[in-house]
Amino acid sequence: MRRLMYEAQRALASPVRNPRMATVIGRLLGAAFLICFGTGLYSHFLQNPLPGMTFATRPAYLYQFTQGTHIIAGIACFPLLLAKLYIVFPALFSWPPVTSFVNFLERASIALFVGISLVQIVIGLVNTYQWYPWPFPFRQVHFALSWVLIGLLIIHIGVKLRLITRYWRKDPDGNEPEHLAEAAHPDRSQNLEEVRLWGTTRPGGITGRLLDYIDATPVPTSRVSRRGFLTTVAVSVTAVVGLTAGQTFAPLDATNVFGARKKGVGQQGVPVNRTSAQAKVADAAQNAGWALTVVYAGTERTFTRPQLLAMEQTEVRLPIACVEGWSQMATWRGVRLRDLADAVQADAGTSFRLISLEERGSFSKTQMGHEYVRDPLTLVALELNGETLDLEHGYPARMIAPGRPGVLQTKWLSRIEAIDA
């Protein structure tokens, strides 16, 4: 077994498999994870605010930017994580596999970190397509795993801090870093048993000739090899991001090949996530007797659609920005929510609960903090892009507010009621 381990390490030796390269890719991967964590927390607390939390309503595209960045950073994690695994792969064949209890904890934490990282980014990507081939609730599990992942990242950095510090900067003397396989056993030449077990055999065929060429490559060319590896990683990250980011950022719309949504595709030029058929609201939404009820401290008023249209109308440009990462800017027209709040004499600090005609669903009832209620851009929208609001976009009335996730822009509004302080 020891001989097989040493042979594997020798066969896997490569100019790019060294601690310096592991550190370079590792800090990029760590930055991507931290960006995902920060933007993910923001999205989570927007949807599940703690008591007393308030949020910025400007810039109006804030959530479009944060959630788009969240998805882009998550997609970038795929090539970065695979690159990191490629670099450290020889360390799997170190012998003995475990040298101490501390070493066991180190290797176990790394294995858990890699496993959870793969699960987290895979289920996050699949969620953007609204496909859930698993028995657990995505939002809760994704949120919980994010904390576990960041905790394991901190542990990993702590365990490898000495190595990270040593190789954080390029050697100013231009010395070549050791291969990971050699770095794990720096004194092998002094140990006859390890020299014997290390062996001299190499893989045959094309693989063997390629590895012989790499090992025989002089130092200057090995630098080129590492640059080629970094170029490959950079191209991979650019490709996966560039081919999906257009679903959020308009300048990249032309290159959006794999994004879950395409700008301008959908009723009235806006994509649709949840349809009226899925929500089972078509009959209720098109009922001639529909009216919007607004309630505050025992005062209750109802507004039919003609009555809402007869009120002062406001036009705004706001994006629909969904948690799946896509967004679409659109022109909305309707009644300011603060005017409806004033109609029932609501206090300036009142928050409201928005209730949809949809009877079931995670977001059939949502909360809106007072900072959104009083914002002049927050509308009960009746029109979209110059036309009567389509049923799929929330007819007869829906909510639209700046800096809010699409799931909180409640469609098929039925009732708006004050939340008791």
Image (cartoon, rainbow, N blue to C red):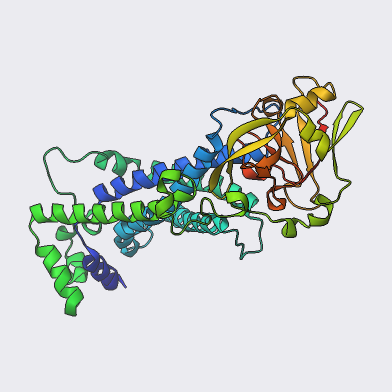
Q: Which of the two residues, 169 or 272, is positioned nearer the viewer here?
A: 272
Query: In this orientation, does residue 179 appear?
Result: no
398 relative to 278, above or below:
above
207 relative to 246, above or below:
below
From this viewpoint, which residue is outermost toward the bottom? 205
Quarter of the image for residue 89 reads bottom left
Write the residue at 38% across / 59% down. Answer: 98
Q: Which of the two residues, 418 or 9, is positioned nearer the viewer here?
A: 418
Write the residue at 79% across / 42% down. Answer: 355
Q: x, y (%) of residue 319? A: 57, 40
Q: x, y (%) of residue 125? A: 51, 56
Query: In this orientation, does residue 39 appear?
Result: yes
Q: x, y (%) of residue 296? A: 86, 27
Q: Which of the two residues, 128 or 377, is positioned nearer the viewer here?
A: 377
From this viewpoint, which residue is outermost toward the right? 298
Quarter of the image for residue 1 reads bottom left
Write the residue at 68% across / 49% down. Answer: 393
Q: x, y (%) of residue 58? A: 56, 27
Quarter of the image for residue 382 reads top right
Q: On the picture, is 190 further left or further right than 116?
A: left
Q: On the picture, is 77 further left or further right than 421?
A: left
Write the residue at 34% across / 51% down. Answer: 238
Q: Which of the two residues, 108 or 254, is positioned nearer the viewer here?
A: 254
Count of labels in the image:
0
Q: Which image quarter is the C terminus in?
A: top right
